[in-house]
Image (tube, rainbow, N blue to C red):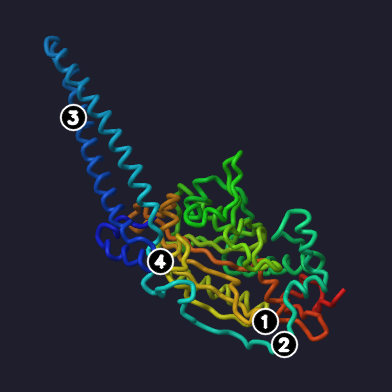
Amino acid sequence: MIDLKILREHPDVVRASQRTRGQDPALVDVLLAADTERRSAIVEADQLRSEQKDLGKLIGKAPAEEKQELLAKGKELAEKVKAAHALESGANDRMVAAHRAINNIVAPQAPAGGEEDFVLLETVGEIPEIENPKDHLELGESLGLIDMERGAKVSGSRFYFLTGAGAMLQLGLLQLAAQKATANGFTMLIPPVLVRPEVMEGTGFLGEHSAEVYHLQDDDLYLVGTSEVPMAGYHMDEILDLSDGPKRYAGWSSCFRREAGSYGKDTRGIIRVHQFDKVEGFVYCRPEDAEAEHDKLLNWQKEMLAAIDVPYRVIDVAGGDLGSSAARKFDCEAWVPTQNTYRELTSSSNCTTYQARRLHVRYRGENGKPQIAATLNGTLATTRWIVAILENHQQPDGSVRVPAALVPFVGTDVLTPK
């Protein structure tokens, strides 16, 4: 949730953020009204409770001839307190609903606009000249790496098997990411992939994208689409010690997405699937350190992309294309020869205090008082990377060169057709 202090002192900033996101700025006025109503209800209820407490003391000390009158007054006051409590509870519910309806405030540095209005920050590597390139699925099938047909037979469309060297390629990618993460001070986690509703909602995934989330109704648990979710909940309701700097975690997990509304998009191969594996970086830090941590996450992602030796670009995502929790997001997109375009391989988001406020994650400031922490997340490797590796490293004879950093994991430097 956004900081109410910013809302009260700078409502135009929040309205501008709503417009940048392409969302209704009138929701800001709804929240302001709900905030005023709640505060007024709290004051009134507190005053009545105070009166009730004072009256209780008087009744205890009153002579017998005055007690009946005071008791009658106490009964009347109790009814008023009960009504005021109901009003306070209703005002609080309306306030919480209005508060959760507003996404994180877009950072002023983020570009305005929608999906196509990103700002190009950097282009890395040379686009390979490949005559009549094969796509990743044709390569994957000929090399014995991907089996979509049996994946569909077992689980339905958009499921697959990674087989032989394909499985080793993914394991190598994730292991390389884990090694780089731990070398840079991350603590590795293998988290649960089923989480409670309050954790999924706390990270902002049950808003406009809730249709993409798998829900196990009988258990009221959600399958995560990224290990960002359980890692965000890892320190829920805790006060962290950040005196030695940020807490950095890297989660290795399977991820699940319904891909609702994406029918007809990327149906071929493993670009947009229902299940994939990923190593995700996650950071808890003081709000004033969040921008620096965001830059560090991006640099660690660039190190990983350098290791798989594919051309890519870095973009600053426009406000209208941000997720609900992100104030700013950088994407690294690799070149995909058969699509003649760049496709996202990594994203890193600065969520400022938005998630931590919803999940009650705090740290002790210099004055010793608990303060809301900031959170950030960023991809370090995922299944989709196999697409970029196969297509960019394909050879005229149908073989694929294995990036040097992955050779120890795959066991060969060239994948040849079966």
In the figure, is residue 242 to the left or right of 85?
A: right
Return the x and y of residue 314 as percentages of the image width and height: 53, 78
Q: CA distance from mark 4 to mark 2?
A: 39 Å
View extreme (right): residue: 418
State the separation of the CA atoms marked 2 and 1. Answer: 8 Å
Q: Amino acid at mark 2?
A: Ile
Where is residue 320? Give x, y as percent.
Answer: 43, 68
Q: Amino acid at mark 1?
A: Pro
Q: Which disc, if any, is residue 130?
A: 2
- Alpha-carbon span between mark 2 and mark 3: 82 Å
**Are the residues at dot 4 and dot 3 in contact (C-beta closer than 8 Å)?**
no
Q: Residue at the location (80% across, 59% down)?
A: 150
Res. 51 mark? 3
Q: Which mark is residue 9?
A: none
Instruction: List the residue tagged with mark 4.
Output: 21
Query: Which mark is first along the chain, 1 or 2?
Result: 2
Judging by the rendered image, the residue that carries numbered circle 1 is 337
Viewer-nearest residue: 289 or 392: 392
Count neighbours of disc 2 (C-alpha within 10 A) and say few if under 14, some if 14 to 19, many if 20 or more.
some
